[in-house]
Image (cartoon, rainbow, N blue to C red):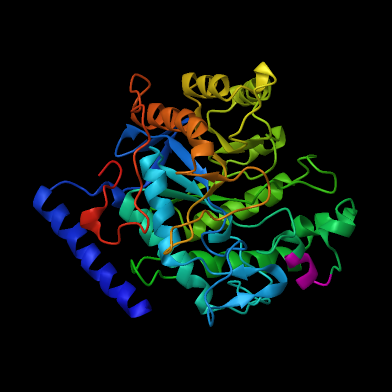
Amino acid sequence: MKQQLLALVALTLGLINNGAAQSQSPDIRDLPVIRNGSLLLLNNKPWKAVGANVYWLGLGENVLPSPGEPYYPPFHASYPTPGRTSQIMSVITAMGGTTIRSHTLGVSVGNPLSLWPSPNQTNPDAFQPIDWAVYRARVYGLRLMVPLVDNFDYYHGGKYTFLRWAGFNLSRSADERNPQVQEFYNNSKVVNLFKAYIETLLTHQNAYTNLTYAEDPTIFAIETGNELCGPVWGDMDVPTEWVRDIGRFVKELAPGKLFVDGTYGVNRTHFAAKEVDIFSNHYYPVSTAKLQRDLETLASVDKPYFAGEYGWLGNAATADASLPAWYRQIERDPKVMGDTFWSLFGHNVPECNTFVEHNDGFTMQYGNPAHAAQIKIVRQHFVKMSQGLSISADAELPPVACPAPTSLTEVTPLNV
């Protein structure tokens, strides 16, 4: 299977290069997203990051793999198939999106299928699905935001994994309020382990593109982590010096990447961290009042704002949680660089006869009639953000083939 995929990639990259040579114009997929004050630019034009959280692209937990494929039963962990990943790229494109935020493209520690099953021990097999996801995003013209660690203790690992590796016997279920969790930020052994992991990730050369993750502009942003905080949930107790230290380290390895503060909330003390390019927050449920407070907090800083997660179902019972109203507020404020809803799942590829399910209540499934009305609202917003506020999306949702196309000639990349 891997040899067939590599052959397909060689053909695809050949088509890309031939097309670029014939047009004598740069392939926008080779250009980085850059920050100019509070705006993001791509090819010297304003660019917005809108799309979905697809947390499982590097390592999943919702699908029982085929017999003989890698599987870790205690965490229900398995690698997503190339077909599942390709279909999700097709869905994002159909929705008018530009971006995917994906935890497991960067967070993968502590179980046998992880990038780092144990400290400083790299599992080369774990790079296969990540390589494929980065490559397929590049084919479709999508960009990726990659968190480096998780505040929680889920199947893909996170800050508690690094703490345990350094000798702190902690878990989130028992020790969330234990002051020792701050050793993730303050203990030199933990920090050095974390940096070594970051280096392993960013210096890896993708088998499909021959680019390291640091080099590939498809990964446009690196985020410190997902919903980081201290011993008290939502306290934003993430030391500024740690943010600066990790930011410096990432930019030394990958100077073309934008750096995102992954604290759960906008921490004013982090305004002193010049390494931070983007500030963010999450919304459960969406709230125009909360968004306004965040934007007012950021008014003194010439940097963009990103709504990294939000519940796409909204809450019709309260006007403040109206998804269309929240979108309108985002659309009219140029400081908001974009948003990615939580969270997107596709079909059981290649059978394509059912949807993959997840149990958190926020699972969007494109093609599911029960989700169609809300998906149209989301798609209208994506089109306005990515193509211009005067542009309206078609009334009907475009069909997405399952299985998804596998050759470049069958794919219509964005903005290429």
- Quadrant of res 263: top right
* Residue 383 vertical position relative to residue 87 in the rendered view, above or below: above
Depth check: give the residue in front, 134 or 241.
134
Depth check: give the residue in front, 304 or 287.
287
The location of residue 313, given as percent across then percent down, is 61, 33
- Quadrant of res 398: top left
Inspect this view and state whether residue 214 appears. Answer: no
Q: Work out which quarter of the rendered image holds the N terminus and state it.
A: bottom left
The location of residue 370, given as percent across then percent down, is 54, 37
- Quadrant of res 18: bottom left
Residue reaching furthest to the left = 22
> What's drawn in magenta, residue-wise?
161-167
Please give the count of numbered marks on the rendered protein.
0
- Which residue is located at x 65 percent, y 57 percent? 149
- Dominant SS in magenta: helix
Depth check: give the residue in front, 377 or 294.
377
Answer whether residue 164 is magenta in the image: yes
* Residue 197 vertical position relative to residue 42 in the rendered view, above or below: below
- Which residue is located at x 55 percent, y 72 percent? 65
Residue reaching furthest to the bottom = 68
Inspect this view and state whether residue 36 appears. Answer: yes
Q: Work out which quarter of the rendered image holds the C terminus and state it.
A: top left
